[in-house]
Amino acid sequence: MVTPVRTTGKPFNPTGRVAKKSPSVGQRSMIPDWLKIKYVLVSMALIAIGIGIFFMFLESEEKKVKKQFHLLSEGVSKETGENIFTLDQKLKKIGSLFNDTCDMAIPAHSISGQMTREEITGYAARGRLYVSELHLTFHDVMITFPQEGEARARVTARLTGKTTAGEGINEAHEIDCLLKKIEKKWLFSSIEVVEVLKK
Amino acid sequence: MVIRFTGERITLLKRVVALENEEVEFQNGKLLINGKEQEEPYLQYPYDWTLPARRVEPGSVYVVGDNRSVPMQNHLFGQTSLTRILGGPLW
């Protein structure tokens, strides 16, 4: 008697055990191609995340530096009929934005050298006596980070307002600033008004 | 010449009167370059500026505007770097 046999095309394996595949001759790696692609994709994703975090960090530092300019603008600006309380608050604000000492170079006002925070606020207080209204705005702010904890900013500072004598103020200057990060705060350490035209 | 004064938008329109290493001087409303008085037919009004002689540094030019009837202190002029020159007017 002949027992019918169903042909499945699979090799005969009466025990049903799964045999381990032995690497064939010429096969270089045990890692399959799909896994290699997975590794590459994960690596690329990690690199992209790293780059993203780096730029996020840079951007946030840039925002912090820009904020200092915004605060300086608020501190220097003066409205008509400013009271003593506001003046005091603004001077304190100005002082908090500067390093213990700051290198100043303002050729038009014959200012050159290192000034302490107190000297700067004193200078700002005296300057306010000559103006009834003053607005300081910053434009074209270009910030670079030459090394860790240092930010260099080149900005256009625009001053508008009125003197106590009634004369209009309308000036624009290119300013080169160096800010240093001290105790998580960006503080002005150098301010130089660029002398474009030297008589 | 159009000179970049500050930022990307604020420019000045000035006339180049002296090149590098030349000596510039104003004497009672007369411009002198290397000690020679210059003819300036483009000036519409007389002026009275007096400024001692100074030499233009290398890489710079000396620029002055044509409206010199204002006091010298109120007029923006002087030596500026060549890198600040953006171009010249077309007409």
Image (cartoon, coloured by chain):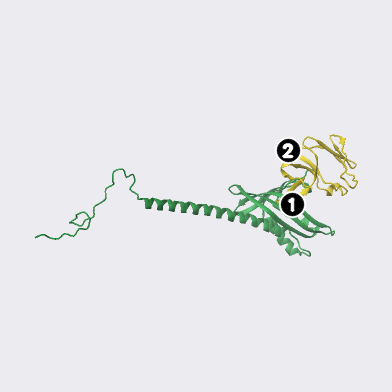
Chain colours: A green, B yellow
Residue closer to the observer: B67 or B53: B67
Q: Name the residue under label 2.
A: B59
Q: In which quadrant is the C terminus of chain A drawn?
A: top right
Kind of residue sitting beneath label 2: Gly
Q: Which of marks 1 and 2 is nearer the N terminus?
A: 1
Q: Mark 1 points at which residue?
A: B10
Position of A30 with respect to A155 (left or right) is left
What chain letter is assigned to the residue under label 2?
A: B
SS for callout 1: strand
Answer few, some or many: residues within 10 Å of disc 1's Cα (few below 14, many 20 plus, some between 14 and 19): few
Residue closer to the observer: A146 or A188: A146
Q: In which quadrant is the N terminus of chain A drawn?
A: bottom left
Q: How many marks?
A: 2
Callout 1–callout 2 Cβ contact below 8 Å: no
Kind of residue sitting beneath label 1: Ile
Q: Residue A11 carries which label?
A: none
SS for callout 2: loop
Which residue is rendered at x = 40% and y = 51% of the image?
A37
What chain letter is assigned to the residue under label 1?
A: B
Residue A136 image point, x, y percent: 73, 57
Answer few, some or many: residues within 10 Å of disc 2's Cα (few below 14, many 20 plus, some between 14 and 19): few
Which residue is rendered at x = 84% and y = 48% of the image?
B73
Residue B22 image point, x, y percent: 80, 35
